[in-house]
């Protein structure tokens, strides 16, 4: 399930004091072209390969009803033809040169990730530049790709009970903000986006000034920069895209979703509105989410899985997003578990946090774990590119990667209690249950 | 951040990239350390990050030894090893590891049980101490056994809620039958009902020992210190004198075996086709790899091109080879909406025939070779990848120059050689095909392929 990454991808907290010489802010060379394209270069000659990550500040938060899922669809269409590259040729040329790629779309950003032998760099830059504004949206390919997305939705959402429940909980908890829908979009929108609308959306968001290009690997900086200027320099800057203005209004009471359908086991989820990464309260909430949910020693795993044996699995946490989103808890209950008791146990644990806060040892555990995660993510050129790209997109500047540990380390214990009291309230809560049809045993 | 990716990670290849200019890329040769009790640990110092990865394979403690009625006991034993030691309870173990942000795991494969540990260098002594306590003095408590059994039983149930997961379980049983390679690590409802904590203790006592154990340690640590820590943790341990593990020959399907699982709420039909492949280290490996890369092993492969790119029938379609010491398995798989399953399987059978009849173009072969070579170096980037590779190569007697030979082999694959691999390995007459979907909407489309055995998803077991 894709939401298991709540804390995974971006756990990059590192303080300057904690980093040895190998991955320093000073080694990352920052450039900006006249058209506004921001470039981060990091030479790393450990393997004869390079990772090229091109990220755009666009995701499902920029969509509107009728066009839900279109950010993700454009991500697919970027491989289906641009001015100099015929449909399907991007992948064929890249693979012939020994490269591979993937791409992903989130709430807040769309990323194109290429991994290739170092000598394929120029070809990759040329093809990436060509599709930055030159995607052709060939009508026949567009219809075929539309059905690929429909299949992806059937596989990822419609045939998965946890995902069905999640989509309902999300759309119930978030009423007004575009985070209301899943990145995949509603099936009726997928089946009816118009080509001219898709192209209009693409033109709005795909411009050099709305992108960042990150290159890590076996290259020489000056030469790589020349190539980037050669291919990306001629692309004109775009009009800055419109800001997302919708603010989620305060929730007025607990919301509940109940789904009954054919299933072997029930599902249970609770979410609360939570701060964005740009809010100082994000840090105490993030620490809380790890103490409550990370690993078998976490408070909720202990209570729900180990002690009361109500569940076989519990996970989730505070998501990292540009606008306020959710703190989520996903529970895999035992088939005969009392779901009300699961909710009560979670509330008891939150009440404890609100009253007593966390221990020093628990906070230290979070700091240790995040430091360990940080280095784990730095063992590959792709990992380095990914950390730089995600931090730049979500936090607004990659430099945050090198100081974020300080934001965690300076959180005071009373701030954690205050944040828990503020966010974990009845009015802020949405509860979702999926019960096997015929009622619970 | 919720993300949707263009290609599912499981479709991305096992083997990754090297262009021709990169012939120099090599797996660094490790040093050999021998512990006091004879355990061999291959060692490589790396300095880029303050991390250490450690792997240890315990020969003979895998699922190959499992009696059929105790299916899953090898994995259950590995799981229970971490659930308490002579001095620490299960919660103390997880607390200590989580406090360090360390990852320690015990698992069971077919012919061995394995320890894996990844942590910050400064925590390595403590992590090894815990690993040693778990391995050499596990408590095997009845209460922990019961908890693990319940979690497994629930997991087996929830698999059936997702047709994409369910089809894998049904395929495994349909293909392997009772062969140990077809055992579920989770066990089955029947085996879980039979096993007790005493059986797990007995399994540990009989099969866990230092004889033939092979490990690897890669990371930011001096050799001398590494050896001292490893000796302190494992050098005094002997354990069982495990009997050599022997696996019966793999089943080979004769003729066509078709199985349809009715899942009435499924909106897509999911399928897996399987047939015999080749054994680990077989000399056909480079040819088969270049061939399968083109057939179903990458985004522009034949299967993906015909099913996804040209027709939009699916989000993902692919094929792969699984290799074991005693043989191997070829698998192809995909899914599509119920009304399109006939169209999709027609394409599959056309391609299965075509690849043996026509083979590939010279450009395809060049592209496949470049792709396999070019995607290779990133597969060995991390400490964990290097340690895992050392252990795998040593355990299977493949030699540390295995990948040098493999990459040279890839460079030498010709059109004729790839076609030969297709003729030998791509099935047209003897295979197992399992489909999970809404039978009322797909049954008629499937008739033309032969006689199907039909089961309901709600029937017990797989």
Image (tube, coloured by chain):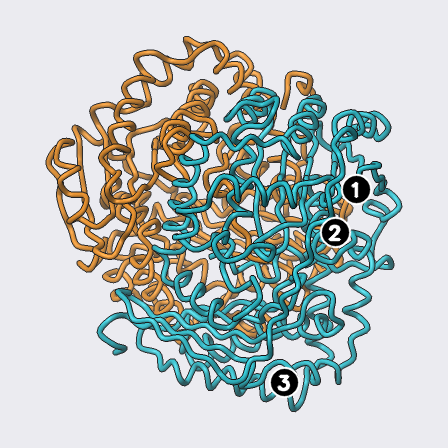
Instruction: Examine the rendering and report whether any part of residue A305 can be seen.
Output: yes
In the image: residue B353, left or right of residue B185: left
Q: Position of residue B232 (x, y in %)?
A: 67, 57
Q: Are marks 3 and 1 in contact (CB under 8 Å)?
A: no
Task: Name the mark nearer the viewer: 3 or 2.
Answer: 2
Instruction: Examine the rendering and report whether any part of residue B323 can be seen.
Output: no
Q: Quadrant of the C terminus of chain A?
A: bottom left
**Which sits in the foreground, B101 or A15?**
A15
Q: Is residue B106 above or below residue B368?
A: below
The residues bearing labels 3 and 1 have C-alpha atoms spaced at a distance of 42 Å
Mark 1 — residue? Answer: A38
Label 3 resides on the chain identified as A
Mark 3 — residue? Answer: A353
In the image: residue B3, left or right of residue A55: left
**Label 3 element class:** helix
Mark 2 — residue? Answer: A392
Q: Is residue A34 above or below residue A16?
A: above
Tint of chain A: cyan
């Amino acid at each position: 399930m894709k939401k298991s990454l709540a804390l995974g991808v971006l756990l990059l907290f590192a303080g300057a004091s904690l980093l040895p010489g190998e991955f320093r802010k000073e080694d990352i060379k920052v450039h900006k072209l006249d058209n506004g394209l921001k470039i981060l270069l990091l030479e790393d000659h450990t393997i004869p390969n390079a990772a090229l990550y091109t990220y755009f500040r666009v995701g499902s938060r920029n969509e509107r009803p009728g066009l839900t899922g279109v950010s993700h669809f454009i991500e697919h269409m970027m491989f289906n033809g641009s001015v100099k590259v015929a449909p399907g040729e991007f992948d064929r040329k890249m693979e012939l040169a020994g490269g591979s790629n993937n791409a992903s779309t989130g709430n807040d950003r769309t990323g194109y990730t290429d991994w290739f032998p170092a000598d394929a760099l120029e070809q990759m830059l040329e093809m990436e530049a060509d599709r930055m504004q030159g995607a052709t949206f060939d009508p026949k390919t567009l219809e075929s790709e539309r059905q690929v997305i429909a299949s992806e939705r059937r596989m990822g959402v419609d045939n998965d009970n946890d995902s069905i429940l999640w989509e309902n909980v999300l759309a119930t908890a978030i009423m007004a903000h575009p985070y209301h829908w899943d990145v995949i979009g509603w099936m009726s929108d997928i089946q009816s986006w118009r080509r001219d609308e898709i192209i209009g959306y693409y033109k709005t968001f795909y411009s050099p000034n709305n992108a960042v290009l990150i290159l890590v690997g076996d290259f020489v900086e000056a030469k790589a920069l020349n190539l980037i200027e050669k291919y990306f320099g001629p692309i004109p800057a775009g009009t800055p895209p419109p800001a997302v203005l919708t603010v989620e209004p305060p929730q007025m009471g607990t919301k509940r979703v109940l789904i009954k359908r054919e299933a072997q086991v029930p599902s249970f989820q609770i979410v609360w509105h939570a701060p964005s990464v740009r809010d100082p309260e994000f840090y105490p909430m993030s620490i809380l989410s790890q103490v409550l949910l990370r690993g078998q020693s976490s408070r909720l795993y202990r209570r729900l899985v180990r002690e009361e044996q109500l569940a076989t699995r519990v996970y989730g946490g505070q998501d990292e997003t540009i606008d306020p989103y959710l703190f989520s808890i996903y529970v895999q209950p035992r088939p005969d578990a009392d779901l009300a008791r699961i909710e009560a146990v979670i509330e008891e644990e939150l009440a404890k946090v609100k009253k007593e806060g966390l221990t020093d040892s628990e906070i230290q555990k979070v700091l240790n774990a995040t430091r360990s995660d940080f280095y784990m993510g730095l063992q590959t050129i792709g990992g380095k590119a990914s950390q730089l790209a995600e931090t730049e997109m979500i936090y607004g500047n990659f430099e945050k990667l090198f100081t974020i540990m300080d934001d965690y380390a300076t959180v005071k214990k009373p701030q954690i209690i205050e944040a828990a009291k503020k966010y974990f309230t009845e009015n802020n809560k949405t509860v979702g249950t999926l019960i096997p049809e015929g009622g619970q045993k | 951040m919720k993300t949707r990716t263009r290609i599912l990670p499981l479709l991305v290849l096992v083997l990754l990239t090297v262009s021709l200019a990169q012939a120099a890329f090599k797996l660094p040769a490790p040093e050999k350390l021998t512990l006091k009790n004879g355990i061999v640990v291959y060692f490589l110092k790396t300095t880029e990050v303050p991390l250490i990865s450690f792997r240890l394979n315990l020969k003979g403690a895998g699922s190959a030894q499992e009696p059929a009625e105790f299916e899953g006991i090898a994995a259950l034993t590995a799981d229970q090893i971490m659930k308490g030691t002579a001095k620490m309870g299960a919660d103390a173990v997880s607390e200590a590891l989580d406090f360090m942000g360390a990852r320690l795991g015990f698992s069971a494969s077919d012919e061995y049980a394995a320890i894996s540990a990844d942590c910050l260098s400064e925590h390595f002594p403590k992590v090894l101490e815990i690993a040693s306590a778990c391995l050499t003095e596990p408590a095997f408590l009845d209460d922990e056994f019961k908890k693990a059994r319940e979690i497994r039983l629930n997991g087996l149930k929830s698999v059936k809620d997702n047709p994409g997961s369910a089809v894998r379980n049904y395929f495994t049983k349909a293909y392997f039958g009772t062969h140990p390679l077809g055992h579920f690590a989770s066990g089955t409802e029947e085996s879980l009902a039979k096993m007790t904590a005493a059986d797990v203790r007995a399994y540990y006592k009989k099969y866990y020992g230092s004889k033939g154990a092979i490990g690897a340690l890669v990371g930011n640590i001096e050799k001398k210190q590494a050896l001292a820590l490893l000796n302190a943790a494992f050098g005094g341990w002997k354990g069982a004198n495990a009997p050599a593990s022997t696996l019966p020959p793999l089943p080979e399907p004769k003729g066509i075996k078709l199985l349809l699982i009715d899942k009435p709420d499924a909106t897509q039909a999911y399928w897996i086709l399987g047939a015999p492949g080749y054994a680990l280290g077989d000399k056909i490996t480079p040819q088969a790899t270049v061939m399968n890369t083109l057939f179903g092993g990458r985004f522009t492969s034949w299967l993906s091109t015909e099913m996804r790119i040209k027709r939009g029938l699916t989000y993902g379609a692919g094929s792969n080879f699984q290799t074991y010491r005693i043989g191997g398995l070829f698998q192809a798989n995909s899914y599509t909406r119920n009304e399109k399953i006939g169209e999709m399987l027609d394409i599959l059978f056309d391609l299965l025939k075509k690849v043996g009849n026509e083979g590939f173009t010279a450009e395809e072969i060049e592209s496949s070779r470049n792709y396999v070579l070019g995607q290779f170096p990133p597969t060995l980037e991390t400490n964990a990848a290097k340690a895992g590779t050392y252990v795998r190569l040593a355990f299977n007697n493949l030699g540390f120059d295995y990948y040098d030979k493999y990459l040279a082999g890839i460079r030498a694959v010709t059109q004729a050689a790839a076609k030969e691999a297709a003729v030998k390995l791509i099935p047209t007459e003897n295979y197992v095909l399992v489909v999970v979907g809404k039978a009322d909407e797909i049954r008629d489309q499937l008739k033309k392929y032969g006689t199907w055995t039909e089961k309901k998803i709600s029937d017990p077991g797989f």
